[in-house]
Amino acid sequence: MVENLLWLARLLFLGLIYWFFFKLIRVVTVDLGEISSGSRPSGEGQPVEGRSGEDEGRSGGGRGGRGNQRNRGGAQPVPALYLRKKPEQAEIYARLPDGQERAIEAGQAVPLGEGASIGQNPDNRIVVMESFVSGRHARIYRQDGGYWVEDAGSTNGTFLNGRRLKKPHKLRFGDKIALGDTVFEFAR
């Protein structure tokens, strides 16, 4: 009987070691993927809502607030999620305020407005068809003058700047949100 318990304890310990190494390798590969993808995409990507570059320049709504552009009329740039890393097999699309759906490719953005739900279910505002993404994976919402992100009870977790979210977290420009192998950046 004691031998059986020792054998079971050894198997459990071995399983925990394998689980630890699996998690370690996953974190390292996600971090390396973010590093190799570089910083915010350059000007070749267009916002999903389809404003032209000329309009962006006039309103100051361009990405990242680069340059010394002034906002006319005091309008603030609209915060958005920029798709930084898209797995080859993944399909990602966004539902726009006018009801249309548009595919999102790396370098494109989804203006947040009041927020967005993200996951595989087609009723999410941002739909990510990827095997590691849950039906209702994460939620971004406006509160107290800022944007917050929270995991919506996903199986594989939502990661903010490489750390798994355990509670809602206020977003800062430049934060990276990872769902499975898909990475978004919160920016203007």
Image (cartoon, rainbow, N blue to C red):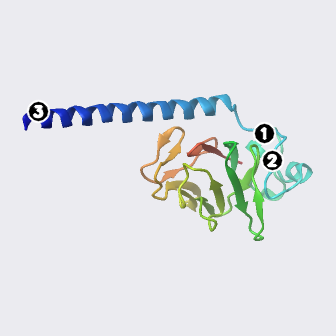
Instruction: Locate residue 56 relative to residue 160 in the image: left or right.
Output: right
Above or below residue 8? Residue 58 is: below
Task: Measuring from the top left, give residue 166's x and y in whole percent.
Answer: 42, 49
Which residue position holds label 3? 3
Q: Nearer the viewer, mark 3 or mark 1?
A: 3
Q: CA distance from mark 2 to mark 1?
A: 8 Å
Q: Are marks 2 and 1 in contact (CB under 8 Å)?
A: yes
First in sequence: mark 3 vs mark 2:
3
Residue at the limit of the structure toward the bottom, as seen here: 99
Q: Is residue 12 above or below residue 58?
A: above
Of 49 and 1, nearer the camera is: 1
**Closer to the camera in the image, 4 or 143:** 4
Percent of width and height locating residue 77: 75, 53
State the SS at label 3.
helix
Tell me the SS state at disc 2: loop
**Residue under label 2:** 62
Cα separation, mark 3 vs mark 1, equals 67 Å
Please state if 7 lies on the left or on the right of 107 as rendered. Answer: left
* Amino acid tagged 3: Glu
User: Label for residue 130?
Assistant: none
Q: Amino acid at mark 1?
A: Arg
The residue nearer to you, when weighing 150 against 158, is: 158
- The x, y position of residue 124, in whole percent, is 62, 64
Out of 33 and 5, give the one closest to the viewer.
5
Give the alpha-carbon distance from disc 3 to disc 2, as whole Å: 67 Å
